[in-house]
Amino acid sequence: MSLQERINEVQLRIDQACERTGRNSEDVHVVAVTKYVSIEATKQVLDHGLHHIGENRLQVVKPKWEALGDRGVWHFIGHLQTNKVKDIIGKFTYIHSLDRISLAQELDKKAAQGNSVIQAFVQVNISGEQTKMGMSPDQVAGFLSEIKDLKHIHVIGLMTMAPFEGDPEDTRPIFRGLRELRDELNTMAVTEQPLEHLSMGMSNDFEVAVEEGATWLRLGTLLVGKEEEEGWES
Ligand SMILES: *Cc1c(COP(=O)(O)O)cnc(C)c1O
């Protein structure tokens, strides 16, 4: 399948999932995760009109960003070491993996220096799997009130990763859990403005995520593809 065909196919499946649940497909945004592909392939993605680009490894991002940075809106989706924050400020508009106070403080400090505001999703480990990053659901309210005064981070929602399931239906409780947590936090009014967004759903499970309220999907393999020959660890 060509890139255009994959884009069409993904959009159709998003539209159908929206239709099943009475959602508006304009409320579902796609981050094209280009972490598995080259600069050239990333350029193709941008040429095809996908503007939101997701990356998770800074060593690989640097040359890509230098070549294509001003053409897209960049989302950092991986674990971020505090001492690497300086490398993303001014390049990435969004971070999907805000998971601790020290990272929030450093992001705020560096964003303030650059006179910018970073849009953030708090990463939550809904599944409780040891291997998954993110804070536990019961830590989020406290975390949000602790970072409330950091003016250079704007928390717009929550993010989670579901464990890979042979049957995507099995991921539903995870996505539902993230939505319920967001709604509960909004009822408690722990943030100045209600949390709007849910970053959830990957190649294997995005339709279930849409049905459960995802507003940002992070799609790599299915949409952009994967260049095995690059030999990157994943
Ligand atoms: C790699 C990655 C994705 C994309 O995964 P695919 O299954 O290839 O769609 C999404 N989110 C995060 C955090 C990732 O690391």
Image (cartoon, helix red, strand yellow):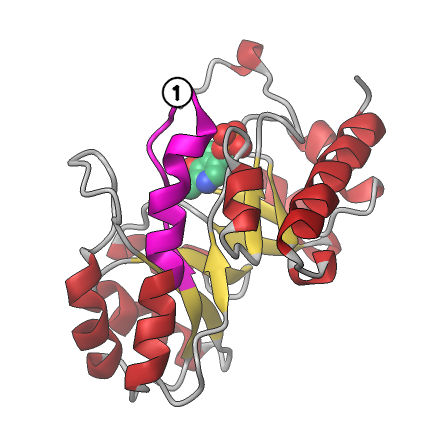
Q: Where is residue 161 in the image (x, y as percent from the top left)?
A: 37, 42
Kind of residue sitting beneath label 1? Glu
Please check the rendered image and state whether residue 174 is part of the magenta-colored stretch, yes or no.
Answer: yes
Left/right of residue 140 with respect to residue 192 in the rendered view: left
Left/right of residue 170 with respect to residue 71 in the rendered view: left
Question: Tag 1's secondary structure?
Answer: loop
Of the pair 148 and 63, the residue shown nearer to us = 148
Quadrant in the picture for residue 112: bottom left
Quadrant in the picture for residue 164: top left
Please check the rendered image and state whether residue 96 is part of the magenta-colored stretch, yes or no.
Answer: no
Quadrant in the picture for residue 121: bottom left
Residue at (48% x, 70% y) in the render: 119
- Residue located beneath label 1 in the image: 233
Q: How crowded is mark 1: few (under 14 residues within 10 Å), some or many (20 or more)?
A: few
Of the pair 208 and 102, the residue shown nearer to us = 208
Q: Is residue 212 visible?
A: yes
Left/right of residue 176 with respect to residue 13 in the rendered view: left
Outermost residue, top side: 229
Q: Is residue 233 above or below residue 181?
A: above
Residue at (36% x, 79% y) in the render: 186
Quarter of the picture holding the C terminus: top left
Left/right of residue 76 with respect to residue 69 in the rendered view: left
Q: Position of residue 137 (x, y in %)?
A: 21, 60
Q: Is residue 62 visible?
A: no
Instruction: Find the magenta span and give its range.
Output: 158-179
